[in-house]
Image (tube, rainbow, N blue to C red):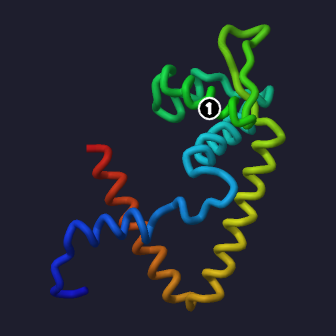
């Protein structure tokens, strides 16, 4: 593409079509998967296997109002149980077995997909591609922080 002007349509296509993360999800929506992963990691780090909403909101950098809507949606889908603490003030969530199974299915599918990619693309080409994508992600992350 050297010397060729890249238009907004090409850029949009790259981000929405070529890099569309939705393409690697089969069992969960991307947003659901990301939220469940946050919950999973915080539950693993907690002493009682629970994640309190205030801690989750802080970790995700969202308001309690936004998080409450997200958790309500997850509860409606059967992915979390939302309870009030008996001993601490506050509410907490835990992943249901359904969510744990969906996460496992998604991770298995991602491993399968990555294996196919590794078989189809030579190692040096794949390494260059991953380095380039990493640089693009870093540029995008820094731009969001401004």
Image quadrant holding the N terminus, namely bottom left
Residue 18 sits above or below residue 80 on the image:
below
Closer to us: 38 or 106:
106
- Residue 20: x and y in percent read 47, 63
The residue carrying mark 1 is 73
- Residue 143: x and y in percent read 28, 51
Quarter of image, res 138: bottom left
Closer to us: 63 or 45:
63
Residue 3 sits above or below residue 84 on the image:
below
Position of 143 with respect to 36 (left or right) is: left
Extreme-right residue of the structure: 97
The residue located at (75%, 43%) in the rendering is 99
Image quadrant holding the C terminus, namely top left
Closer to us: 98 or 107:
98
The residue located at (70%, 69%) in the rendering is 111
The residue located at (72%, 10%) in the rendering is 88
The residue located at (36%, 70%) in the rendering is 14
């Amino acid at each position: 593409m050297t010397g060729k002007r890249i238009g907004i349509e090409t850029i949009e296509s790259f981000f929405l079509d070529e890099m569309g993360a939705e393409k690697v999800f089969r069992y969960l929506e991307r947003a659901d998967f990301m939220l469940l992963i946050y919950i999973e990691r915080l539950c693993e780090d907690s002493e009682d296997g629970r994640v309190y909403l205030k801690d989750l909101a802080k970790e995700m950098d969202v308001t309690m109002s936004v998080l409450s809507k997200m958790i309500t949606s997850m509860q409606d889908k059967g992915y979390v149980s939302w309870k009030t603490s008996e001993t601490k003030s506050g509410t907490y969530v835990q992943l249901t077995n359904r969510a744990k199974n969906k996460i496992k299915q998604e991770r298995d599918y991602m491993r399968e997909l990555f294996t196919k990619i590794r078989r189809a693309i030579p190692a040096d080409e794949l390494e260059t591609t991953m380095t380039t994508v990493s640089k693009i992600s870093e540029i995008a992350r820094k731009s969001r922080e401004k």
